[in-house]
Amino acid sequence: MAGGVQFVCLAFCTDYAIFFWTRFQKEREENPAKEMYLACVAEATRKSGEVIVCSTVVMIAAYSSTAFYPNLNDMGFMAQNFQYAAGLFFSGLFSIIVTPSWASNHPSLFDNREAHSPNCFQQCLPAMLTTLPEGKRFWKTWAGFVTRGKMMIVAPILAYGCLTPFIYCATLYEPNYNMIDLMKYDGIPASKAYDKLNDHFRASESVKWLYLLKATEIGPANNARMIWPDDVGAASTAEEVAFAQHAMKMSRKAHGNSFGDGVVLQPEFGKQVCKFSEKLQAVMTENHYMMSAEKIDTFWYGADKLGGGQAGCRSQEQISDGLKKAGTSFDSAYGYLVHQSGDKMILAFYPGLEIMAPRAQHLYHLLRDVLEKEINQEFVMNGKRYWFEAEHSSPISYMKETGVRMKRAAPWIIGTMAAIAFIGVAIMFKSCFLPLKFCFTIVIPIIAVLGMTIACYQENWFGFDDMADDGGVNFILPYNQLGMLFGLAMDYDIFLFARVYEYRQEGYDNVSSVQKSLVETGPIVMTAGTFMCVSFFFMMNNPIMGMSQIGFFYFFGVFVDTFFTCTCIAPCVLCWGEWLNFFPGYIPPVTKKYNIDEGCDECCEAK
């Protein structure tokens, strides 16, 4: 599962590098003297490092918490999440140590041009992705447009309006449990071998489905029921009860009991196994699944592998005769089906289905909702009452039950992750209500991106048949990858608000702080987001459908965060209710104002 780690590290190293170099460029433009070079490196490292460290901590927390979903390690995803967390740790460490060190030790490589003069790379980028005059002109126009008057309300409404269809689509989610099709890759030998075995031998259809049958003692038997199990009559005296018990023991002694004393080896338990097997056949046949006695593997019922008799229910004597004819012991022939404690046994059957296909999923629900509710019952054995139970196990049951456990754990894991991130933000910026604003800029877009993934891979809204052929979105994706998207959204929001907070502390009013921050961080966020999208674009084109869905989720998550949240939603939300951004922290008096039209500062009297 390590295939995505390098893409994530590449994306974040690029992201953090852009944060540093653009901040360094700004410092050099304000302090172009050669003797100020190292001071600019130090200041750029301090200011960009705050965002990089905060982002790294949030991402590590997101990945580490996501790793604790139930059963995640069985499929390799726990290791993957810890690899991601470790990769993010080293990416952040690299970005605040190695990158500034390069700049400090090799000034000739990074300081060899005049201020405001574009290099060859910048000239190839669109103006809005650079801090050149043309790019700043675009962001001044845009910042002035979305942070004034009614557009403060209209712009977020329009952005949310574009996301609304996908938010609705998120409610249509039907998990895809067919992990074999999602993780197949036709170009590797393992997948070729699997397909060849299926084509020639129907290998996936020969997989065992299992039932764990067990008997649990629940108390002494009713006297009448113990002696007359078929309800023919009833004993009225204790002497008759004792005689009946003695008769049963003498009968077993006379015929011999080579099986042992285990509960599941007794004839009474064998009758329950036969009833269960016949009920299993009946339920499957009624629902158009081919099921015969030969496809059941147990010593009480199924094909007679030793004596050559007919398939069906067998008595203890018939099993003993078969073992004698075969010249083998019970342990050698059937020991693998019986638990060493003697109170549990395995019943295996072969439904002849691909193990995770839709028909297999339907059969699982049929067995769980119909058969297991009807078959659990009480029976009497050796003067005691027992409760007969059957517990199903198969590859698809494991996937389904894992999905249920993950769904139950999700509110706790996601809630803990969000609480840690929001508390960290509140402490960092000394604001109680800022995390509430982040809900508008993080939670709703993430739901929309999930809906977009469902629209493409499940509902096929865009007509990409190849992407929708495998049955929808992997059931693990909303749980395992949500932390990553949450961290990405927090990343850019923190980057924007850190600059807003900085300018507000310098004396700018709230709206001016937002406008000035958007003009300066807009090109950086747009550039970082675009390059991160490029990284995830290639991950999205992975031929392994499971990895492709993760890449799609990341790609559009970053796309929405870059082109919708950070440009249309977050600036407007930060303009609502200035005191909510900073309460209860200290807010200095307003002494400056940013003229967005002229792109310059204006002094004003302190209030």
Image: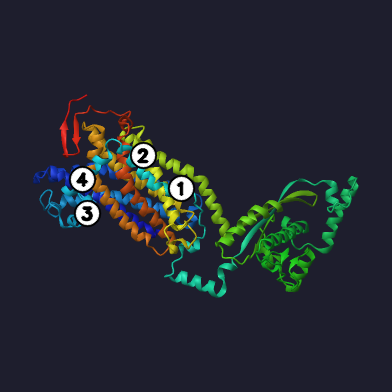
Q: Amino acid at mark 3?
A: Pro
The quadrant in which the N terminus is found is bottom left
Seen in the image, is 107 located left or right of residue 301?
A: left
Tell me the CA gap for discs 4 and 3: 19 Å
Sequence-first disc among 3 and 1:
3
Where residue 371 is drawn, which disc sits there?
Answer: none
Q: Determine which residue is flagged by label 3.
A: 126
Residue 23 - label? 4
Structural crowding at the residue carrying mark 2, measured as other residues with C-alpha within 10 Å and reported as few (<14), some (14–19) or many (≥20): many
Amino acid type indicated by mark 4: Arg
Left or right of residue 15, residue 421 in this image: right
Q: Quadrant of residue 255?
A: bottom right
Left or right for 453, reference 345: left
Q: Which residue is mark 2?
A: 438
Instruction: Pick out the residue farthest to the bottom.
Output: 200
- Percent x, y for residue 321? 78, 69
Disc 4 crowd, CA 10 A, few/some/many (<14, 14-19, 20+): many
